[in-house]
Amino acid sequence: METKRTVRELLDRLPDDCTIDDVLYHLDVLQAVARGRADVEKGRTLSHAEVVEQLRKKWLVENAG
């Protein structure tokens, strides 16, 4: 029932002239946020410093040669 309630609330917030693409886009955003929150709850996150280090390694190694 949670999903149906979420979809109904979304539809109530969108303008009457919204398209199916608009609805799908907003549903995708809601799903991405839910996945992100679940990741946070389960500790599947990286600190800013960890992300910076991973990006530095990737771009410095891949672009060095």
Image: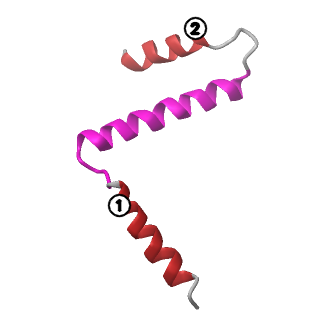
Q: Residue 56 appears at what percent x and percent y?
A: 46, 72
Instruction: Look at mark 2 in the image and give the residue it sits on.
Output: 12
Q: Is residue 20 magenta?
A: yes
- Is disc 1 surrounded by few (<14), some (14 to 19) or many (20+) residues within 10 Å? few
Residue at the far front in the pictured view = 49
At a point 47% along the width and 38% down the height, the residue shown is: 32
**Marker disc for residue 49:** 1
The amino acid marked with disc number 1 is: Ala
Give whichever of discs 2 and 1 has the lower sequence position.
Answer: 2
State the SS at label 1. Answer: helix
Vertical side of 10 occupied by 51: above or below: below
Residue at the (43%, 12%) spot, across then down: 5
The magenta segment is 19-46
What residue is drawn where x is 55% and y is 34%? 28
- Farthest residue, direction bottom: 65
- How many marks can you see? 2
| Horizontal side of residue 16 vs 49, given as left or right | right
Residue at position x 51%, y 80% in the image: 60
Q: Name the one closer to the observer, 1 or 18.
A: 18
The amino acid pointed to by label 2 is: Asp
Question: Which secondary structure class fits the magenta region best?
Answer: helix
